Amino acid sequence: MNNRFSLVIGCNDYNEAAYNTKTESFKNLSKAANDADDMHKLLLFAGFHSTLLINATVTQMDQATIDLTKQVKRYIASGAATRDPPVIVVFFSGHGDEEQKSTRFLAVDGRLGG
């Protein structure tokens, strides 16, 4: 059973209207999705069970996080983790936000992801 799990997210196409405020504006990016795709391919090559999201909404990001957690819990419940502890990689390329010393990923739909 594979002990390597990853979630890779790349966000280029931000909904500018959702993010534009008096204090900040988030423009579209040109390379974040490519970076995520490259990282996903590298992780697959390294034997990871990897999920790739491109231009994800916060709902998609949340669901992928839940799915990743379930995969890891199943692995642990199988007893295999006593021999090979799980290795988990979360990679995000896109805009982020820091609020009250907590850094968060920005989804393309104008809402904050965890």
Image (cartoon, grey):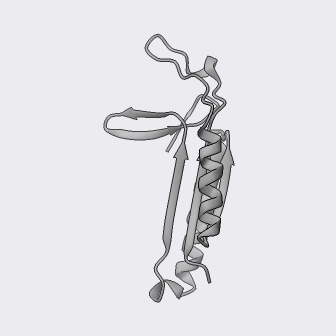
From the top left corner, tell me how far across and down residue 23 is, in percent: 43, 14
Q: Is residue 8 above or below residue 74?
A: above
Of residues 10 and 58, the one nearer the viewer is 10
Of residues 8 and 73, the one nearer the viewer is 8
Quadrant hosting residue 14:
top right
Quadrant hosting residue 77:
bottom right
Residue drawn where x is 61% and y is 73% of the image: 47
Residue drawn where x is 59% and y is 36% of the image: 107
Residue drawn where x is 64% and y is 41% of the image: 33
Toward the left, the furthest residue is: 101
Residue drawn where x is 65% and y is 39% of the image: 57
From the top left corner, tell me how far across and down residue 97 is, in percent: 44, 33
From the top left corner, tell me how far across and down residue 28 is, in percent: 61, 26
From the top left corner, tell me how far across and down residue 75 is, in percent: 57, 78
Total marks shown come to 0
Of residues 98 and 63, the one nearer the viewer is 98
Q: Is residue 48 above or below residue 59?
A: below
Toward the top, the furthest residue is: 22
Q: Is residue 60 rendered to the left or right of residue 78? A: right
Q: Quadrant of the N terminus?
A: bottom right
Q: Is residue 114 above or below residue 45?
A: above
